[in-house]
Image (cartoon, rainbow, N blue to C red):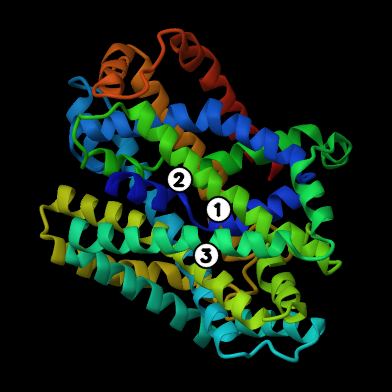
Amino acid sequence: MGFILLSAGCAIGIGNVWRFPYVAGAYGGGAFVLFYLFFLITMGVPIMTMEFAVGRASRKSIIRSFEELEKPGQKWHLHGRLGMAGNYLLMMFYTTVTGWMLYYFYQMLTGKFEGKNTQQVEDMFGEMLASPQILTSAMFIVITAGIFVCSIGLQKGVERITKLMMSLLLVIIIVLAIHSCTLNGGIEGLKFYLLPDFQKVKEAGVWETVTAAMNQAFFTLSLGIGSMGIFGSYIDKKRTLLGESVNIAILDTFVALVSGLIIFPSCFAFGISPDQGPGLIFVTLPNVFNEMAGGRIWGTLFFVFMTFAAFSTILAVFENIISCGMDLFHWSRRQSCLFNFIALTILSLPCALGYNLLSAFQPLGEGSTVLDLEDFLVSNLMLPIGSLCYLLFCVTRFGWGYDKYEAETNTGEGIKLPRQIRGYVTYVLPVLLLFLIVKGLLDR
């Protein structure tokens, strides 16, 4: 249970409750959800088994796992460096966005949104982004809390806190979803969210929708950079890895889908467009809560849920980063925590300052920010490229080899990897990943 909740905690984060709803809103609601579920099953789960298999067979973090399993003279271990870079880069913007969640929880709890009209709520979001003091302070609190929990140890710190947060998170989202679905007018939001409308897919673009669904499947599961592999290295061989991967994917998908049940009925009940982009959570929903009876309570619960979801991923990826320092430099846990506390604080500053002091730096064109660049590098390049490395390492004779991967995955009790899947993961899945990588680059 600890392994499932830790791994699910890594997967469940802003990809589920911040990114998923606004991407679904932009690409036609229910139709996008179908594409997303399809790619989660056909691409996400197989890649997850591979990351877990490499972790469990090597008993190492990503920085050393390929070295343990590769044949003499091979260079697969270079992916360990890419994976480490991916973990750091993910945290360089994830800590800032988690800080937004934490700050909005404080704002909602203290009643700062009460009595504000739509424009004033939007202005409050802009004021937060324009303040280097607010963004850096919130980011610093997130990093400090994450490193402190990891410094206590895996079971006493990370596992204990994640179990508590995940249990509370599941209760909170169910309560919020029931409340949202019973709002007057919320049924239209449910129709938008759950009934596929392929006309809207045509309007958004079929390939764009497909690519967005693929990217979301990888982003939400944090695949390709060893974030899952580290937990694979900690577990025993009592259960098959396909069964564990399915359990985690189900829990992750449950949170993503229920997040939509909270957001879309609320938006439609109060006449707010669900395709507002990244500002959906921070601009649109505070207005929704202002209109609700007991909105301050519901809003506070929502941003507690958001903060828990994001912080669970922070803990999981921090654990991977800290373990890599211990593997690579033979540091103690405390030494690795201290080094990474300093490194992550410095590396996270550009994103936190990208909306204010560094706003003139627009790396991806007019209006873009440091966060956009870092998100693009992680979501469009590092996650799919890293996943392709895991895939080729596990299924080709030039790497670990399919037979060894299959034996590791099927060790223990639970769902076994069917033999018929070999052709698909060897020949079809690499093509899909290459398409995702090339499409992501061409879109920029």
Quadrant of res 83: top left
Helix, strand or loop for disc 2: loop
The residue depicted at 39 percent of the width and 63 percent of the height is 165
**Which label lies toward us, 1 or 3?**
3
The residue depicted at 79 percent of the width and 33 percent of the height is 206
Place of residue 172 in the rendered image (x, y in percent of width and height, measured from the top left): 52, 64
Query: Label 2 is placed on what type of residue?
Result: Ser
Q: Which mark is residue 15?
A: 1
Helix, strand or loop for disc 3: helix
Give the number of marks: 3
The residue depicted at 44 percent of the width and 56 percent of the height is 89
Place of residue 235 in the rendered image (x, y in percent of width and height, measured from the top left): 22, 39
* Above or below, 379 relative to 46: below
Quadrant of res 110: bottom right
Q: Which badge, 2 or 1, is on the more N-terminal residue? A: 1
Query: Label 1 is placed on what type of residue?
Result: Gly
* Above or below, 311 relative to 251: below
Q: Nearer the viewer, residue 128 or 73?
A: 128
Residue matched to label 2:
222
Residue matched to label 3:
172
**Pointer 2: residues within 10 angstroms few (<14), some, or many (20+)?**
many
Specify whether 337 is left or right of 426: left
Helix, strand or loop for disc 1: helix
Specify whether 44 is left or right of 240: right
- Marks 2 and 1, how far apart at CA: 9 Å
- Marks 2 and 3, how far apart at CA: 23 Å
Circle 2/circle 1 CB separation < 8 Å: yes
